[in-house]
Image (cartoon, grey):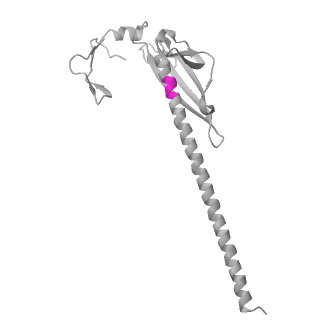
Amino acid sequence: MYSKRAFQKGFTMLETLVAVGIAAIFLSGMVSLLFIADRSSENALLSEDALWYGSQGIEALQSIAFSDLSLTETGSLSFASNQWSLGTSGPETLENGMQRTVRVQEVLRDVDCVIAAVGTADEDSLFFESEISWIDASGRSQTNTLETLRTNWEDPQGECFGEMANFITLDISTDANWHGFKQLRDIHITNNGTEDVI
């Protein structure tokens, strides 16, 4: 027969084991949450870096003279003598193990000068693409791609943009001003032709 005292000791030991078990479960859950939060934070920072590098790629392509650009599927960028240049061997390796591939592709237009999947190559327009690839904190491959269209508005040579550019006048003489040192406002653009300008 068990004494009351032995029963209380056993019950106290059982309570202690249950409390330790609950604490262990709680602590392991907290450690898991902290690990997941840290990984999520690291992935968010990597995504932000990828967006920045992708934007940098697009802006670098836009800064290169239109006549110095050539079509490429796996291009890379280099910066020297205060200017960007386009290389045809890519991708380039960036910080954090990221890789950037830039692409310069032709733009096809139909007979109405509208961009189309099938048509004639427009010598005054190019598609730019900046693709960033990396491995995230979870070991998964990630890719972020930015793209834009560039038009040779300074010296158009083709039929679509060349004719239309001659119809446009730009007037900044009357009310143009910088608003908040960020936005240029009150620029008047006029179409002097008889057709819509694309």
User: Which residue is located at x 75 percent, y 92 percent?
Assistant: 3
Q: Position of residue 81 (x, y in %)?
A: 51, 14
**Residue furthest left as drawn:** 174
Relative vertical location of residue 7 with respect to residue 154 in this rendering, above or below: below
Q: Is residue 115 visible?
A: no
The quadrant in which the C terminus is found is top left
Measured along the vertical axis of the image, is residue 143 above or below residue 101?
below
Q: Residue furthest front?
A: 81
Secondary structure that dominates the magenta span: helix
Left or right? Give the position of 173 relative to 55. Answer: left
| Magenta span of residues | 54-58
* Residue at image point 54% right, 37% down: 47
Q: Residue at x 56, y 22 (%)?
A: 102
Answer with the quarter of the image where residue 188 lies: top left
- The quadrant where residue 105 appears: top right
Q: Is residue 7 visible?
A: yes
The tally of labels here is 0
Query: Which quarter of the rendering shows the N terminus?
Result: bottom right
Residue nearer the viewer, 43 or 6 = 6
Vertical side of 12 occupied by 182: above or below: above
In front here: 43 or 130? 43
Front in this rendered view, residue 144 or 115 = 144
**Residue 5 point in image, percent of width and height:** 71, 89
The outermost residue toward the top is: 157
Q: Residue at x 56, y 18 (%)?
A: 78
Question: Is residue 57 covered in magenta?
Answer: yes
Q: Is residue 167 magenta?
A: no
Q: In the rendering, at what x and y percent does residue 35 appear?
A: 61, 51
- Residue 109, image x, y percentages: 46, 15
Question: Which residue lies most toward the right here?
Answer: 1
